[in-house]
């Protein structure tokens, strides 16, 4: 199966230069501030920005234990331009069986005096894409992007 039925996309203008948006993405202490919609807390376990590098975050709500959120592997890293990661592999290209198989293509494009930030998410099939949509893809990823925009806009 191919095509749009298995893909979800979201795009927003962020009033900060691509270098600032990249910095907000590429530093664990910054990523933890916006990656998951508040009030859920985020802990960045791994953020190894190179092909084969690990990407792992955990989340917690209401002060309980941190639970798994994302465990993935970076496939492509082009600073200030593009990040590609997948949950079907973990650090070092090790195959996994994730609860949600996806590949995310994140782009940072200079636009006016800011950045066009886009996330294109490819799923195994239309059913998994629909499940992700029903879980609140637009709202969840949109909220995270709004938090990223606010965070990047405050950076010096």
Image (cartoon, rainbow, N blue to C red):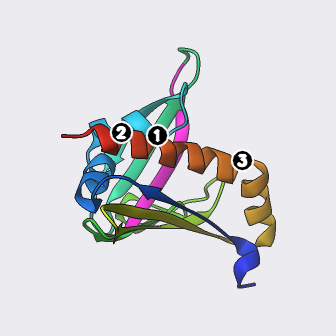
The reply to whether the magenta stretch includes residue 77 is no
85 relative position to 133: left or right: left
Label 3: which secondary element: loop
Image quarter where the C terminus lies is top left
Q: Earlier in the sequence, mark 3 or mark 2?
A: 3
Q: Which residue is mark 3?
A: 136
Q: Which residues are magenta?
A: 65-74
In which quadrant of the rendered view does residue 34 lie?
A: top left
Give the quadrant of the N terminus: bottom right
Q: Earlier in the sequence, mark 3 or mark 1?
A: 3
Q: Is residue 125 visible?
A: no
Asked if the residue under mark 2 is in contact with the one under mark 3, i.e. CB atoms within 8 Å, the reply is no
The reply to whether the C-beta atoms of the residues labelled 2 and 1 are less than 8 Å apart is yes
| Residue sitting at the far top | 63
* Residue nearer the viewer, 109 or 83: 109
Closest to the observer: 138 or 98?
138
Please tell me whether mark 1 sits on a helix, a strand or a loop. helix
* Residue bearing the label numbered 2: 151
How far across and down, in percent of the image, does residue 135 sit? 74, 47
Please tell me which residue is depicted at 32% across the width and 50% down the height of the picture.
47
Query: Residue drawn at (32%, 43%), measured in percent from left and top?
Result: 153
Q: How far apart in space, not on screen, are marks 3 and 1 (Cα)?
A: 16 Å
Q: How many marks?
A: 3
Q: Which residue is mark 1?
A: 147
Q: CA distance from mark 2 to mark 1?
A: 6 Å
| The magenta stretch spans residue 73 | yes
Q: Main secondary structure of the magenta part?
A: strand
């Amino acid at each position: 199966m191919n095509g749009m039925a298995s893909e979800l996309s979201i795009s927003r203008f962020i009033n900060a230069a691509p270098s600032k948006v990249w910095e907000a993405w590429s530093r664990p202490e910054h990523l933890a501030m916006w990656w998951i919609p508040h009030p859920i807390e985020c802990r960045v376990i791994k953020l190894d920005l190179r092909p084969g590098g690990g990407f792992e975050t955990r989340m917690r709500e209401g002060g309980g234990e941190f639970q798994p959120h994302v465990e993935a592997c970076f496939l492509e890293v082009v600073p200030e331009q593009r990040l590609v990661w997948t949950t079907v592999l973990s650090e070092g290209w090790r195959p996994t069986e994730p609860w949600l198989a996806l590949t995310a293509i994140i782009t940072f494009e200079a636009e006016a005096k800011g950045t066009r930030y886009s996330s294109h998410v490819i799923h195994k099939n239309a059913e998994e894409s629909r499940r992700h949509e029903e879980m609140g893809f637009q709202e969840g990823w949109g909220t995270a992007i709004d938090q990223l925009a606010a965070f990047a806009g405050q950076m010096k």
